[in-house]
């Protein structure tokens, strides 16, 4: 998430909630992050910890400790809710949001034990 306190001041989010679910009606809050005058890219990993310690919580807002050791979460709906802004602002500016997931080899799947590498097969392996 790209935010800039220096340019936006009261429009900059201070407390952000991340909710996931299969639809709008079954969203569950998985993480709440408090930002203190952020500037630039703020990396917030949303995966689950393989040791069973949750998704980072409020103690590790950037998730820098175990960002690479997290397992991805499967979801169809991700809601980013800005709960409060700096200086009690009313509107908010999120300059850019990027959501990344793991790379999956589309030529191999769980129900297909063979790897098709010929150009005739790989041509139709992805959706454009």
Image: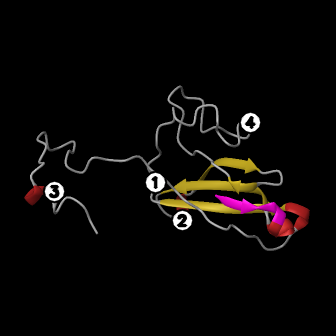
Q: Tell me where residue 12 sits by quadrant.
A: bottom right
Query: Label 3 belongs to which residue?
Result: 122
The secondary element bearing badge 3 is classed as helix
Q: Which SS class for mark 2?
A: helix
Q: Earlier in the sequence, mark 3 or mark 4?
A: 4
Nearer-the-camera pick, 41 or 14: 41
Image location (x, y in percent) of residue 88: 89, 65
Q: Position of residue 46 (x, y in %)?
A: 57, 46
Name the N-terminal-most of marks 1 and 3. 1
Label placed on residue 24: 2
Circle 1: element type = loop
Point out the image quarter for the C terminus.
bottom left
Span of residues in magenta:
1-6
Asked if the residue under mark 3 is in contact with the one under mark 1, i.e. CB atoms within 8 Å, the reply is no
- The residue at which mark 4 appears reads as 59
* Mark 4 Cα shell of 10 Å, populated few (<14), some (14-19), many (≥20): few
Q: Tell me the CA gap for discs 3 and 2.
A: 35 Å
Going by the image, does 86 lie left or right of 82?
Answer: right
Q: Residue at x 46, y 43 (%)?
A: 72
**Which residue in the structure is indicated by mark 1?**
75
> Mark 2 or mark 1: which comes first in sequence?
2
- In the visual, does 113 lie left or right of 109? left
């Amino acid at each position: 998430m790209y935010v800039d306190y220096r340019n936006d001041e009261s429009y900059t989010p201070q407390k952000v909630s991340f909710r996931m679910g299969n639809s709008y009606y079954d969203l569950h809050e998985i993480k709440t992050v408090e930002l203190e005058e952020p500037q630039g890219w703020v990396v917030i990993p949303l995966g689950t910890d393989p040791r069973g310690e949750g998704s980072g919580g409020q103690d590790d807002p950037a998730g820098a400790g175990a960002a690479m050791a997290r397992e991805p979460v499967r979801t169809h709906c991700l809601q980013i809710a800005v709960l409060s802004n700096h200086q009690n602002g009313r509107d908010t500016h999120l300059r850019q949001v990027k959501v990344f997931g793991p790379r999956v080899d589309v030529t191999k799947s769980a129900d297909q034990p063979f790897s098709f590498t010929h150009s005739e097969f790989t041509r139709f392996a992805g959706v454009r």
